[in-house]
Image: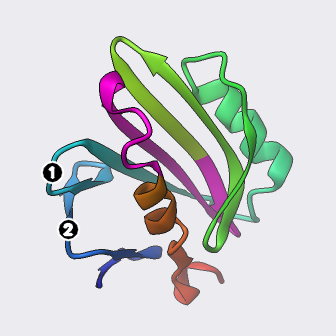
Amino acid sequence: MNVLETEWWTLALPPEWWADTEEDSILVGDRDDVGCIEISTLQKEKGEFGPDEVREIAAAESGTTADWRPSTLGDFAGVASRFAEEGMAIREWYVASGPMLLFITYSCDEENRGMDDAAVDELLDTLQLVESANP
């Protein structure tokens, strides 16, 4: 198992998954190229993200009329949704831990919907907040 480590959080990656940095986000994918995870980080300067604030951000930022449900990924908690758009199956998460908010998307061709769900869930459940990121 490899560990993807950023300044704010860590994620355990199985050997068959890769990670790359792209501008303001981290891309994670499996070597079969079925789908890709994109993770963006927002850090609050003062205070922490509360559950209501996370839901409000998800509703405001998501371009869909998503059906948000509670979700916990490792040290992070918030909301998740899934939908199809332009031939793509998409899963979205807005999750926070203290002053850190992660916006995570997983997308794949609609014909591959569900193929990597268990692996993606297992991978995202390893998200851990870096202690120095939570003053």
Q: Is 110 part of what is drawn in magenta?
A: yes
The segment highlighted magenta reads 94-117
The image quadrant of residue 81 is top right
Between 109 and 5, the one nearer to me in the picture: 109
Residue at label 2? 16
Residue at label 1? 32
Q: From what the image shows, is residue 123 above or below residue 118?
A: below
Q: Is residue 87 left or right of residue 121?
A: left
Q: Is the residue marked by circle 1 packed among few (<14), some (14-19), or many (20+) residues within 10 Å?
A: few
Dot 1 amino acid type:
Asp
Question: For the N terminus, which image quadrant?
Answer: bottom left
Q: What is the number of callouts on the image?
A: 2
Of the two numbered discs 2 and 1 on the same chain, state the one appearing first in sequence.
2
* Pointers 2 and 1 in contact (C-beta within 8 Å): yes
Q: Is residue 43 left or right of residue 65?
A: left
Measuring 71% from the left and 52% from the top, which residue is drawn there? Answer: 78
